[in-house]
Image: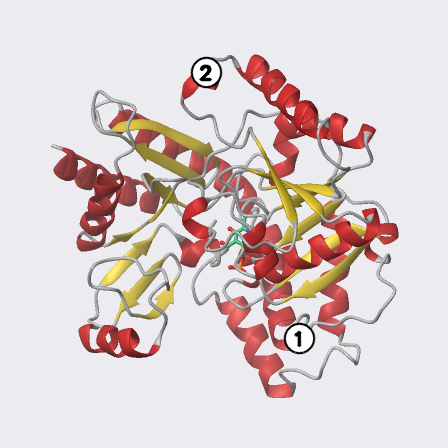
Amino acid sequence: MTDLYARHKSVLPDWLALYYEDPLEITHGEGRHVWDSDGNRYLDFFGGILTTMTAHALPEVTKAVSEQAGRILHSSTLYLNRPMVELAERIAQLSGIPDARVFFTTSGTEANDTALLLATTYRRSNTILAMRNSYHGRSFSAVGITGNRGWSPTSLSPLQTLYVHGGVRTRGPYASLSDDDFIAACVDDLKDLLGHTRPPAALIAEPIQGVGGFTSGPDGLYAAFREVLAERGILWIADEVQTGWGRTGDHFWGWQAHGQSGPPDILTFAKGIGNGSSIGGVVARAEIMNCLDANSISTFGGTQITMAAGLANLNYLLEHDLQGNARRVGGLLIERLRAVAAQVPHVREVRGRGLMLGVELVKPGTDEADPDAASAVLEATRADGLLIGKGGGHNTSALRIAPPLSLTVAEAEEGAAILERALRSVTQ
Ligand code: PLP
């Protein structure tokens, strides 16, 4: 691995984010486990980066991909292909968006870029509302609407972006408010902002912020925002790149936790649907999707090989009720982690839902984020055979737990025990 790291340093950019002081080289996986090039086995509590939605090397997906590869990998989006149309039909129906149209891309970034193209064209405005601490991808325009400063390397955005408060319950005057008062304060802030600007095209938001550390405003926040937006004809783009497909247990989409506000105007997805093969996409009602008056394609979006993976993966997810599994196993896991947290003063909060759980670390007795402790826990869990993620806003002080949705109770317990050992050893 060290040799590969040295070669990587001489050929890849310095800003490429890499975990671990001695970076990992993963060679293969099975179920909820992966192996590195030294033969070490790890329980994967990060599911790729929420990309391995069902399981590593799931036989159903492998079979569909190899059968498709034996026929044709790709034949250009200038021709029709059956798996693409079939997957689009399934996603349109699952989205809850009326008269939905689906456009496939190759990543979450490109999906959000497309959503921005649609919203700005439809509303003839290049002003976008985005949430503080958000992450929406790495293209020029996605970076321009990313509120998380750790992931936003330029301020030269092609869009005018206004940041909205509410995605994170930060310290300061907001921290002590009840959920209802917090939502009311955020709605007032939003109205105030809108009073001082040209009409924005859309608000883009992650129902639970992913890179931001699995944080979210209270349930109902986006329903309350929606009322304000709808009155002014501003669209709502739900970035479901991390939160979709039942990961949060109680709901199939993250936006559904926010009350009866109805489906978003535009929904973007990626990550888990391909189980590791590169599928992203946008869903919008026809009126919005069809607002472009010039041709547009994504050469590799909707290509047969990824669509075959997506269909097999989605079928498995639904047939095995992995959303229900995420709710049940995630419920046990969060309880277990909260019990540990009660005894470890470094843990400020264990949050999240389903199999999307965040553990926020602070310096004991203070409210101060502790990114060093988070890095140390990552190293300690790795040494003990568990992979987890980290994230957060200005400071990367949250541990992120997002295993494949087929996680078993025994694996949840095994992972929680490793995490407990790591938290105790690093923080004592
Ligand atoms: N949106 C969200 C919420 C994400 O978490 C990410 C990636 O982490 C993206 C968009 C960008 O997706 P991709 O890395 O596939 O371009």
Determine whether, in the image, residue 401 is placed left or right of residue 125. Answer: left
Q: Is residue 6 in view? A: yes
**Residue 383, quarter of the rendered image:** bottom left
Residue 259, relative to residue 31: is it above or below?
above
Residue 332, relative to residue 6: is it above or below?
above
Q: Which residue is mark 2?
A: 173
- Residue 126's x, y, as percent? 73, 49
Which residue is drawn at the image coordinates 57% and 13% (left, top)? 181
Label 1 Cα crowd, 10 Å radius (few <14 / some 14-19 / many 20+): many
Disc 1 to disc 2, C-alpha distance: 49 Å
Which residue is drawn at the image coordinates 88% and 64% (left, top)? 293
Q: Is residue 252 in view? A: no
Which amino acid type is shown beneath numbered disc 1? Thr
Which amino acid type is shown beneath numbered disc 2? Pro
Determine whether, in the image, residue 392 is placed left or right of residue 70. Answer: left
Cβ atoms under marks 1 and 2 closer than 8 Å: no
Question: Residue 303's mark?
Answer: 1
Determine whether, in the image, residue 416 is placed left or right of residue 199. Answer: left
- Residue 327's x, y, as percent? 50, 36
- Mark sitting earlier along the chain (1/2): 2
Looking at this view, is 38 or 360 the one in front?
360
